[in-house]
Image (tube, rainbow, N blue to C red):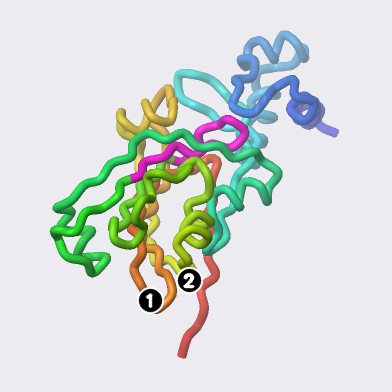
Amino acid sequence: MAIYQDVKKELIHRMKEGIYKAGEKIPSERDLCLEFKVSRMTIRQALSELVAEGVLYKTIGRGTFVSSPSLYQENLKSFTHTLIGQGMVPSTKIIEVATISQLKKISHWLNVDQTDPFYKVKRLRLGDGVPIALETIYIPKKYAQGLLKHDLTTSLYKLLEKEYGYDLTHITCDIEANISSRIIMEAMNLQQQTALLKITGITYAQNDLKLFYEESYYRSQLYKYHVDILNRP
């Protein structure tokens, strides 16, 4: 076995044992060279493979960090359900709740009158305490009267189904690459600009009702979106 593979194996062992925890910075190349008594080239080769495998990630000017487990969102499944299914503890921080109107574009997309008021709910979603997504929901007030009185730190899907009788059927969404703005960095406690997935879309309920519009930003290092694409004649 090559020397760099021994180093790689030991680093993986330390991560499994919790010596290097998810999101934490590992020792510098120089410190690892001194500890393992090997060349910098050997350390770099071990780190490069771990980065390529997604176990570690590098941030320019800051160092190398332990990646958190990736989340796989499968079709129409709530964030809460997704995290629980992957053995993580979900939590939510409410950033903003409000009643607003005159949302011309969103009113058009949801086929409601421009004067109709909307509930706006902005939430920070976390997994095991790590910020993963910043989401903003716009739902016509007439579709969910009294929504803001409920506990909005839980699954919105489950709330809409249980309290309002909706059967959520499908989502149409756009996914694009994005870079975190200063506002998003602040909300998600990011130390520097980070690659994000911007997901915008409409969630439908029974009878093809366009129930709400969502705009969300997910940390691309922690989140993957799985979609089944069907061939419909």
For image coordinates 53% across by 63% down, the residue present is: 75
Contact, mark 2 vs mark 1 (Cβ under 8 Å): yes
Q: Amino acid at mark 2?
A: Thr
Which portion, as a residue range, is magenta? Answer: 121-133
Q: Which mark is residue 169?
A: 2
Q: Where does residue 164 sit, x and y in percent of width and height?
A: 45, 62
Mark 2 crowdedness (10 Å alpha carbons): few <14, some 14-19, many ≥20 = few
Say which mark, if any, is on residue 14: none
Name the quadrant containing residue 10: top right
Which residue does the numbered mark 1 point to in the structure image?
208
Residue 34 is covered by the magenta coloring? no
Q: Secondary structure at mark 1?
A: helix
The N terminus is located in which quarter?
Answer: top right
Classify mark 2: helix, strand or loop: loop
Q: Residue at 17%, 65% (x, y): give it.
A: 113
- Asked whether residue 177 appears in the rendered view, the answer is no
157 or 62: nearer the viewer: 157
Q: Please report the residue visible at 61 percent of the width from the left and 15 percent of the height from the top.
A: 28
